[in-house]
Amino acid sequence: MKNAARYLIFIVLLFDSCTSPADRKTTMDSSSYSIEDDIPKAEEKKQSEGKTHVVEIRQMKFEPYEVKVVKGDRVLWINKDITDHDVTELANRSWASSPLKSGQSWSMVVTESVDYYCNLHQVMKGKITVEEKGN
Amino acid sequence: MLALASILGGSLSAQENPKLSDPEVAHVAVVANQIDIAYAAIAKEKSKDADILKFADTMTNDHNAVINQASALVKKLNVTPKENSVSKKLLADAEATKKTLRAKSGKEFNKAYIDNEVAYHKAVIGAVEGLLIPEAENAELKALLENVVPALKTHLEHAEMVQKMYK
């Protein structure tokens, strides 16, 4: 098992080194990680020393409603509700997670303040506010 | 549609509440979810409107999730849901509503479907809060019903939002 895990990490690193820095700086690096992903931890360290903020989805609410982060921090959503939910940018639907089943999670690195909602239950809303570092 | 809400609201939540055993409460809960899935199936068959279809999809998924939870719980509690006057009335009313919905098409259908979703969710919220939760004796069954209320209220808000598009 250990060997398999090492091999996997090796592959991930190999893959990662193939990505150009420009790719890596995309504003929302949501594409590479999705549901129940263990692998981001390896990359997270390299990417920045950003904190991870957890938003729980329960009883049809994003909790907390608003998270205040520093640019480059990661936000992790965990679906603890009985129904599926997703996380979708509100204004233009410019990014979205895939539907998360109960128990599944999804994360992304945040670089700008944004309002978001659940596209499956459009009255469910949340907010991420990026604050200046050191203030 | 309003008649449905008042019949349901009137008979299920106000004055003379019928006495229900836990197997009967469970049956009403499952039937109430199945009915909304049946309405959603008609919408998927008859509507081409993206908002209506998306709403219907959410109803199918969410009400199935609730049924799965309820089924797991009755299995755990070793309870067999039992038909009763309330679940029979729900089914009879639903048959009439399905007939009305099937007779409509196009924009008229979309409006009728979403109007009914608003009315039905109001009625079911009334029934769950006013009858099923107070009648449920088993703590886990009560907790499951209490857990479902936020979803029903979110559905109602969502339905009211979609309804505004068809005024």
Image: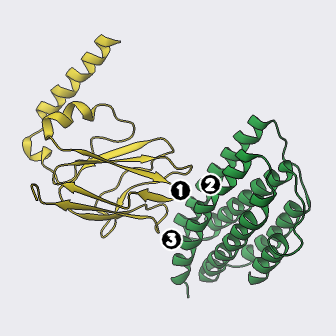
Chain colours: A yellow, B green
When asked about the image quadrant of residue B151, the answer is bottom right
Residue pointed to by mark 3: B51
When asked about the image quadrant of residue A134, the answer is bottom left
Helix, strand or loop for disc 1: loop
Residue B26: x and y in percent read: 79, 51
Q: Residue at x 14, y 40 (%)?
A: A49
Helix, strand or loop for disc 3: helix
In the image, residue B2 above or below residue A119: below
In the foreground, B115 or A56: A56
Residue pointed to by mark 2: B147
Tell whether B97 sits left or right of A96. Answer: right
Give the class, few, some or many, for how many residues have Cα within 10 Å of label 3's Cα (few <14, many ≥20). few
For disc 3, the chain is B
User: What kind of residue is marked 2?
Assistant: Asn
Residue A6: x and y in percent read: 25, 16
In the foreground, B119 or B56: B119
In the image, residue A70 above or below residue B7: above
Q: Residue at x 70, y 72 (%)?
A: B120
